Image (cartoon, rainbow, N blue to C red):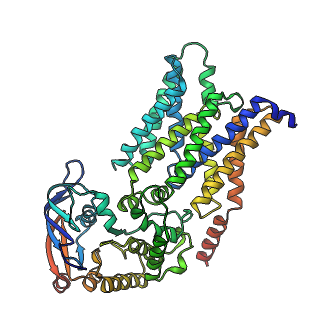
Amino acid sequence: MLEAFNDPFLQRAILAALFAGIACSVVGVLVVTMRISFLGVCMSHAAFAGALLGLVISANPMWLAIIASLIAAGALGPLADRGDFAPDTAIGIVFSSALGISFLLLSIIPGPKAEALGLLWGSVLTVTTGSLYLLAAVAAGAALLVKLFFKELQTVVFNRELARSLGLPATWVFYGILVLSGLTTTASLNAIGGLLVFSLIVNPAAAAYQLTYSLKKMFIIAAVFGVASGWIGLAISWKLNLPTGALIILASCALFILANVFSPKRRARKITVDEGEI
Amino acid sequence: MTAQHPAVKFENVCAGYRGSRTLSGITFGIDTGKIIGVSGPNGSGKTTLLRAIQGLLPVSSGSASVLGLDLVAASYREIRRKTACVYQTLDVDSRMPITAGEVVMMGRYGRIGLFSHPKKADKDAAMRALERVDAMHLSSRPFGQLSGGEQQRINLARALAQEPELLLLDEPTTFLDSKSQQRVRNIVKSVHNETGLTTIVVSHDAEMLAELCERIIVMKHGSVADIVTSTEFQKIK
């Protein structure tokens, strides 16, 4: 069994799951606490559309995925800030645009579509060294940003209007979260896939949300769950020869269900409701 | 506190987003150390006036100064650091992983600066503010699980921890039961009596405005309709 760890594919997959788990969970904590979880799916589809454009015009899909996700972040921020739309409406508009562009580009890609579909499903076992470096850089960057700007992030996720009234750069922090979300989904595209990365962003963070009243601890628990989801999914996939991406997501779902069942917050809520009924 | 300049001075101020005039022709002044009320029907521009004072709403014409800083030319961040606002309610999930003590500490964040962490002086200021509103025992409780009255006391503590020169209260007792309303009123009154902190209270509660404020600005359709004493205000109501 231990011999398997000598396999370079598995070594890269273990590292990819580690970095993707950390990066996605940092973004997840921010979007779950801000109640804009759909941002992950929006960004992943924008990145997917960019990558498809790369395939259509024979350019580097990863660079175009980064550019597309930054354009999506650049569109989302002002749309949400104008006040004409709620943030989830703005996210819905950008998401549907990205989806439409993706379908259009899928239909006009010349030749076989295996590479395009690979971006949709991802494959942690065939992740390239370049993608691994990108994932590592994004994970390290995300952790560093949380360390440096914790108080600003904490205030913005608590209440953006309050953060602004305190003189904090609330708009820049919000735009930074959008950009970080775009970079994370792009970096995870090869390993996790455009469709599945959303689950790895939301599930570990949502599970951590059930277990703690401390934002600092929530970042740590979410990262542990994110990495554990990756490694559990990878181990089962390696053993049973089943699709890795799907098993990573199912592992993250299972961790969320367990966290919800054993959540002290759930028990506290039940007690409050019961007392209210009396 | 010396009265070098009025705490707030608006002269024929128009303000609004993207060309729209949410506030128009606003003229009033508030002397340093005074407590002033703002009243008026829904949509009359009371909360918008507070946003303009904090530099959260662009001034399109007229002359406006807050704490001696020109609202058009000065850095908004400078004004926001010197003013603290307590909002009507903060829509916070009961499971939000942020404690009451952390919310109070947020009052210090505007002063701390980027890349820095709260120091002992900041923690001491937050503790003093918690004691001031008699909420030390709530410090480690999740903010979202506090009652409306407790949350509003924590919001007041957060504003006091900021050590502002101007305190803005936007409907601070709406949605509170009568006991909590009285408690918040008493805190506002005692803070003002002890520190002379210039305070602006926006409220529908005529009784509270008459009890706390010397003068009341009556707003209508985004303009100042009248400025009256508390005695005159009680007669109008």
How many tags in the picture?
0
Q: Quadrant of residue A135?
A: top right
Quarter of the image with the N terminus of chain B in it: bottom left
**Which residue is more in the foreground, A254 or B119?**
B119
Q: Position of residue B100 (x, y in %)?
A: 51, 71
**Height in image: A247 above or below A119?**
below
**Height in image: A34 above or below B136?**
above
Q: Quadrant of residue A128?
A: top right
At 32% across and 63% down in the image, what residue appears? B80
The answer to whether B145 appears left or right of A82 in the picture is right
Q: Position of residue B27 (x, y in %)?
A: 13, 67
The answer to whether B146 appears left or right of B168 in the picture is right
Does any portion of residue A240 appear in the rendered image? no
**Height in image: A105 above or below B147?**
above
Q: Position of residue A185 (x, y in %)?
A: 56, 37
User: Which residue is the extreme one toward the top?
Assistant: A111
The answer to whether B232 appears left or right of B124 in the picture is left
**Which residue is more in the foreground, B205 or A127?**
A127
Does any portion of residue A155 appear in the rendered image? yes
At 83% across and 35% down in the image, what residue appears? A239
Q: Position of residue A244 (x, y in %)?
A: 72, 34
